Amino acid sequence: MDRVIQSPGKYVQGADALQRLGDYLKPLADSWLVIADKFVLGFAEDTIRQSLSKAGLAMDIVAFNGECSQGEVDRLCQLTTQNGRSAIVGIGGGKTLDTAKAVAFFQKVPVAVAPTIASTDAPCSALSVLYTDDGEFDRYLMLPTNPALVVVDTAIVARAPARLLAAGIGDALATWFEARAASRSSAATMAGGPATQTALNLARFCYDTLLEEGEKAMLAVQAQVVTPALERIVEANTYLSGVGFESGGVAAAHAVHNGLTAVAETHHFYHGEKVAFGVLVQLALENASNAEMQEVMSLCHAVGLPVTLAQLDITEDIPAKMRAVAELACAPGETIHNMPGGVTVEQVYGALLVADQLGQHFRRRFDRKALG
């Protein structure tokens, strides 16, 4: 079976990079539909206009309506055709970027994305998640190519809420452990075929970067400043994790996240916060060493990610709720079936409870140390 690695055509990152957006867009097309979050337009529309105008690019700037739905995609496709635009750029959060990628797919034109937060690895991927107009999950739209260009302005990321960066660390945390598991079982990746050595090494480098720079980067965003640590974590959250998960493989951690969506108490938590707990569950399934478990929990604690069910607001009827989570996580087609040797609902149920107990013990020990 062929091994495949895929990634965006070009990845650009730096403070005030949005001011130089036009220079990076110019080689791709000369006429752009700009889809941007309303919040982002509130502080960056002038910068966007000036940057594209300076590069001699024609543009229409359109506010994203807030939901990555087929209806919104169709509306923006119609605007693209009416205005004769030959490329799409999305600027903002994950749903805005997914919408831009979907519009470009249906219009058969190039797409660039400029994430303004570093909370997921979605910007680099060849995937859009579509919802209904009411916000319910609709379907995954698998795309033939990754974005032609990704531009990340770290000065904007530094001004976003620190919890969003922590969520990105939680999502990126799964990259190495899931790629490692998928590689051991020779599971096919989203890119196709078993993982390449390049993807596995990027995934491992992603994890090492989180361990080394995560806490320092959180301090930077709390102070709203750009530091070398923040630059490295933004790259890990966005690029290393994006290429690592897509070309390295996905396994139990994200399936556990999907299972947790069955519990109403978790709905207000970010994707990466639930994925972080999913990593602990995966490690429990693998009977990972105590040293590895402690290392992961220490990182989670340092950046503010949950290590217990209580931190996800799950405090009542835990056995019944975890049974439902385990069943959903093990649904046919879920990525948990990429785990070596396969898994059962009973094994996942047990791992959920054990991960929670390990997290509780960790927190009690940490609290005792803090008290001296």
Image (spheres, helix red, strand yellow):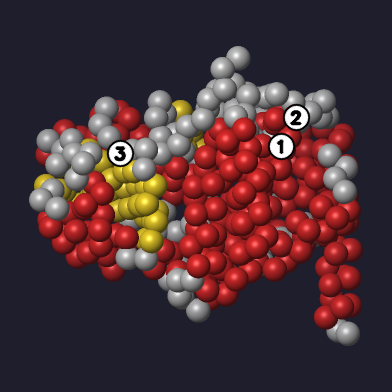
Q: Position of residue 159 (x, y in %)?
A: 43, 71
Q: Residues within 10 Å of mark 1 (few under 14, many from 20)?
A: many
Tell me the SS state at disc 1.
helix
Q: Nearer the viewer, mark 3 or mark 1?
A: 1
Mark 3: which amino acid? Val
Label disc, if present, on residue 184 of the rendered structure: 2
Residue 138 or 349: which is nearer the viewer? Answer: 349
Label 3 sits on residue: 111
Q: Position of residue 287 (x, y in %)?
A: 88, 42
Label disc, if present, on residue 329 of the rendered structure: none
Mark 3 in CB contact with mark 2 (< 8 angstroms): no
Can residue 337 be seen here? The reply is no
Quarter of the image where the C terminus is located: bottom right
Q: Residues within 10 Å of mark 2 (few under 14, many from 20)?
A: some
Tell me the distance, in whole angstroms, between the alpha carbons under discs 2 and 1: 6 Å
Q: Quadrant of residue 364?
A: bottom right
Quarter of the image where the N terminus is located: top right
Can residue 136 be seen here? The reply is yes
Left or right, 99 with respect to 271, comes to left
Q: Nearer the viewer, mark 3 or mark 2?
A: 2
Tell me the distance, in whole angstroms, between the alpha carbons under discs 3 and 1: 31 Å
Q: Residues within 10 Å of mark 3 (few under 14, many from 20)?
A: many
Q: Residue at x 29, y 60 (%)?
A: 18
Label 1 sits on residue: 180
Q: Which of disc 2 and disc 3 is earlier in sequence?
A: 3
**Up-down: is 40 above or below 190?**
below
Tell me the SS state at disc 3.
strand
